[in-house]
Image: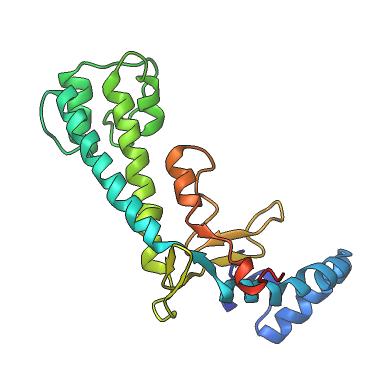
């Protein structure tokens, strides 16, 4: 369980008190031969992770704001292009209206197209991909959704999450107003690697022009603490 509450710990440890839970869990760790992993790997990592969370990540907020203007303009242009291909204006974010445009007005079909739980024709990305070939409106819709998702999840959202009480400073052409703090979950995955949450910074796509631009706004501030001396 990631970030368990006290009741979760008591349930897993089959205990009534926290002290009893600690005793039971330590016994289980010993019985399973995991003492070395616990004491020499996991426990020493705790203060390091805490320090990393508190320190945060330097974010180029100014650049993200520029990206926001740029991609909101592209989103508007895509919206107009989609309306042009559809032959009318409609709410692109409405599955019902989009379904009516694609399946009723444009008569698009695809083999094996799935339906929603309510029986409506699905307009999820996986279903749109089945209709992509030969249908230019689908390609524009997929681009629209990609930009919209990256805008709402990262470009517009991250600047609102940085420290508000940081001291503004200027380093070369980068203006910063604080740091972004994410939770690093030590037990967040079954494979043993850490996960990130609030916000999740591990879901930023690794490829694509927009993803690359977003990734460039995360600043390595090593030089701030290790200045080069001649």
Let me know if residue 172 appears in the view. Answer: yes
Look at 17% across and 39% down and name the residue there: 91
Look at 70% across and 77% down and name the residue there: 47
User: In the rendering, at what x and y percent does residue 135 appear?
Assistant: 29, 17
Q: Which of the image's four quarters has the N terminus?
A: bottom right
The quarter holding residue 123 reads top left
Q: Is residue 132 above or below residue 28?
A: above
Look at 52% across and 62% down and name the residue there: 197
Q: Is residue 52 left or right of residue 212?
A: right
The number of numbered discs placed on residues in the rendered structure image is 0
Toward the front, the furthest residue is 230
Q: Is residue 167 above or below residue 229?
A: below
Q: Is residue 75 left or right of residue 5?
A: left
Q: Which of the image's four quarters has the C terminus?
A: bottom right
The quarter holding residue 118 reads top left
User: In the rendering, at what x and y percent does residue 5 appear?
Assistant: 56, 75
The quarter holding residue 120 reads top left
Identify which residue, 153 or 176, lies in the foreground. 176
Colour scheme shown: rainbow
Let me know if residue 93 appears in the view. Answer: no
Q: Is residue 141 above or below residue 184?
A: above
Q: Is residue 203 above or below residue 227?
A: above
Q: Is residue 131 left or right of residue 104?
A: right
Q: Is residue 207 left or right of residue 33?
A: left
User: In the rendering, at what x and y percent does residue 43 appear?
Assistant: 76, 74
């Amino acid at each position: 369980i990631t970030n368990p509450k006290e009741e979760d710990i008591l349930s897993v440890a089959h205990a009534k008190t926290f002290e009893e839970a600690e005793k039971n869990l330590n016994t289980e760790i010993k019985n399973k031969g995991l003492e070395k992993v616990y004491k020499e790997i996991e426990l020493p990592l705790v203060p390091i992770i805490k320090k990393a969370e508190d320190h945060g990540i330097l974010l180029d907020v100014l650049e993200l704001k520029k990206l926001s203007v740029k991609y909101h303009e592209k989103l508007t242009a895509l919206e107009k292009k989609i309306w042009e291909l559809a032959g009318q204006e409609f709410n692109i974010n409405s599955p019902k209206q989009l379904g009516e445009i694609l399946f009723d007005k444009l008569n698009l079909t695809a083999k094996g197209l799935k339906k929603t739980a309510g029986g409506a024709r699905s307009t999820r990305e996986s279903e749109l991909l089945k209709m992509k070939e030969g249908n230019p409106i689908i390609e524009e819709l997929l681009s629209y959704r990609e930009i919209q998702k990256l805008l709402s999840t990262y470009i517009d959202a991250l600047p609102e999450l940085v420290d508000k009480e940081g001291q503004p400073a200027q380093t070369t052409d980068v203006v910063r107003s604080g740091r972004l703090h994410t939770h690093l979950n030590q037990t967040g995955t079954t494979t043993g690697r850490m996960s990130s949450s609030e916000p999740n910074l591990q879901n930023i796509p690794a490829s694509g022009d927009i993803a690359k631009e977003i990734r460039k706004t995360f600043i390595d501030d090593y030089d701030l603490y290790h200045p080069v001396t001649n």
